[in-house]
């Protein structure tokens, strides 16, 4: 899970994050990048996040999701996510396949993984 706040005070880069060989059991949002995270409306979404996220790999993630959208890669226009990879994603919701939602990112899909829907 990666979350950044909009309007971060400076530009930084977060890269080379690898999530591998994980078993999920009824987890909400098991695979998540959210660059506009703003709990309880405590920030302004008018200024996008300045935190650049790149080289993130989700590999061999299996199990069950508590939500039908098991993959959410929601990046911002100011610094869109780069080099996101999904490989060997095998998650279900109520014994059915799950979906993925993506914005401002074009993940590389290797093997089994849900396709992104904008």
Image (cartoon, rainbow, N blue to C red):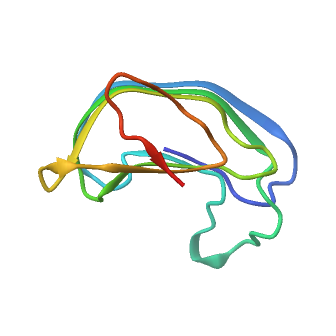
Residue 18 is left or right of residue 37, and the answer is: left
Residue 85 is left or right of residue 52, and the answer is: left
Q: Nearer the viewer, residue 95 or 1?
A: 95
- Residue 5, compared with residue 92, is above or below; it is below
Residue at 82 percent of width and 50 percent of height: 78
Percent across and percent down for residue 30 are 36, 46
Quadrant (top left/top right/bottom left/bottom right) for the C terminus = bottom right
Q: Is residue 37 among what the camera can see?
A: yes
Q: Residue extending furthest right?
A: 10
Q: Residue extending furthest bottom?
A: 41
How many numbered marks appear?
0
Percent across and percent down for residue 5 are 69, 57
Residue at 35 percent of width and 33 percent of height: 113
Residue 94 is left or right of residue 20, and the answer is: left
Residue at 58 percent of width and 77 percent of height: 40
Quarter where residue 61 is shown: top left
Percent across and percent down for residue 29 are 38, 53
Percent across and percent down for residue 93 are 20, 53
Residue at 29 percent of width and 58 percent of height: 68
Quarter where residue 91 is shown: top left
Q: Is residue 25 among what the camera can see?
A: no
């Amino acid at each position: 899970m990666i979350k950044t706040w909009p309007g971060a005070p400076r530009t930084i880069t977060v890269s080379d994050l690898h999530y591998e060989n994980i078993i999920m059991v009824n987890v909400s949002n098991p695979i998540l990048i959210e660059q506009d995270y703003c709990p309880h409306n405590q920030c302004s979404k008018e200024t996008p996040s300045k935190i650049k996220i790149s080289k993130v790999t989700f590999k061999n993630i299996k199990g069950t999701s508590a939500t039908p959208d098991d993959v959410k890669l929601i990046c911002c226009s100011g610094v869109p996510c780069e080099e996101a990879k999904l490989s060997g994603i095998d998650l279900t919701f109520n014994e059915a396949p799950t979906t993925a939602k993506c914005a401002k990112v074009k993940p590389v899909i290797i093997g089994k993984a849900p396709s992104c829907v904008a």
